[in-house]
Amino acid sequence: MAKAIQDLYPENLSHCYGCGRNNPEGYQLKTYLVGNETRATFTPEDKYTAIPGSVYGGLIASLLDCHGTGSAAAFLCQKEGISLEVGPIPVRCVTGSLKVDFKALTPMGEELELKGVLRSIEGRKVWVDMRLSARGIVCATGEILAIRLKEE
Amino acid sequence: MAKAIQDLYPENLSHCYGCGRNNPEGYQLKTYLVGNETRATFTPEDKYTAIPGSVYGGLIASLLDCHGTGSAAAFLCQKEGISLEVGPIPVRCVTGSLKVDFKALTPMGEELELKGVLRSIEGRKVWVDMRLSARGIVCATGEILAIRLKEE
């Protein structure tokens, strides 16, 4: 069984508030590669509201940001034949650019489902297309340009 | 002296985690209109890290999101001659689309400065261009399409 990509990052690169396993105060988002797409789920606490009843956009952008960099790392590993069963992996990406389109208000109290598909890889640049859904309805789409960090 | 735009929102639309004065657990970002630009500042707590030493992108996107919708409301008020000294104002915007370009790692432990300028207003749609700086260096730029809520 493949592990979450964030559980395979090197120890010193696992403190991200959004997805680092070494940040106990953070969201600890987990991204899994399933076939040719990536998946993550997250259920926001009530405090993350925007206008009453809907999730605030900053959290949605945050989830897409971390799912995006995680997806990029997963797709790079897939391309290079790097196992996702044992870490640490020699791949970690940061965000170059993120675009979020809000399609519908994201309801509070629901499990949000994130999916990602690879658009392209060019050297250290990885483009991933994403969507965030609740109850099967797409609430937001995201496009990320993720940049692979150089190995030290 | 003009108040922060978020302190002028109607009570029932002031719970946003990013900028709502009625959300004690949130960031409570405050956006001010100064001449023809908008300004806000924010100093992230240490937990909001990405890779060590830098602020995580989700927080940067969150700040640009709330500064963007606040800026849009401020520019609408300016256009329509609505005072920013007394609330509530009959203007509240939500995010239609947000794009963030990360130009440099955003250092931890610094006051971040956000600025916004109006690109255009077309009916209920408002486009705002933003930048986020630390120590005078632009770390991220943002573009938002904000949508004015219809008055109930």
Image (cartoon, coloured by chain):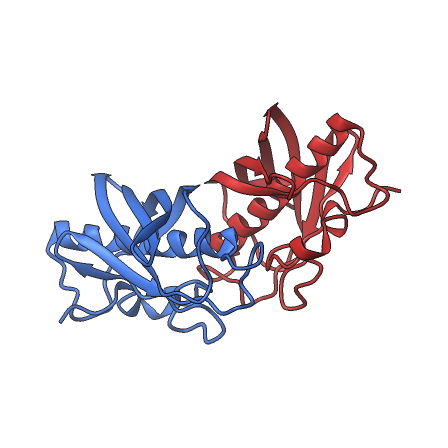
Chain colours: A red, B blue
- Percent position (x, y) of residue A75? 70, 32
Left or right: where B112 falls relative to B35 = right
As drawn, A42 above or below A136? below
As drawn, B87 above or below B38? below
Viewer-proximal residue among A105 and A74: A74
| Residue extending farthest right | A1
Viewer-proximal residue among B108 and B131: B108
Which image quadrant for residue A148? top right
Does residue A106 appear in this view? Answer: no
- Percent position (x, y) of residue B103? 41, 43
Viewer-proximal residue among B70 and A30: A30
As drawn, B30 above or below A37? below
| Residue extending farthest bottom | B24
Quadrant where the image shows the N terminus of chain B: bottom left
As drawn, A24 above or below A36? below
- Percent position (x, y) of residue A48? 53, 63
| Residue extending farthest front | A152
State the residue at coordinates (56%, 46%): A65
Quadrant where the image shows the C terminus of chain B: bottom left
Does residue B30 appear in this view? Answer: yes
State the residue at coordinates (50%, 51%): B57
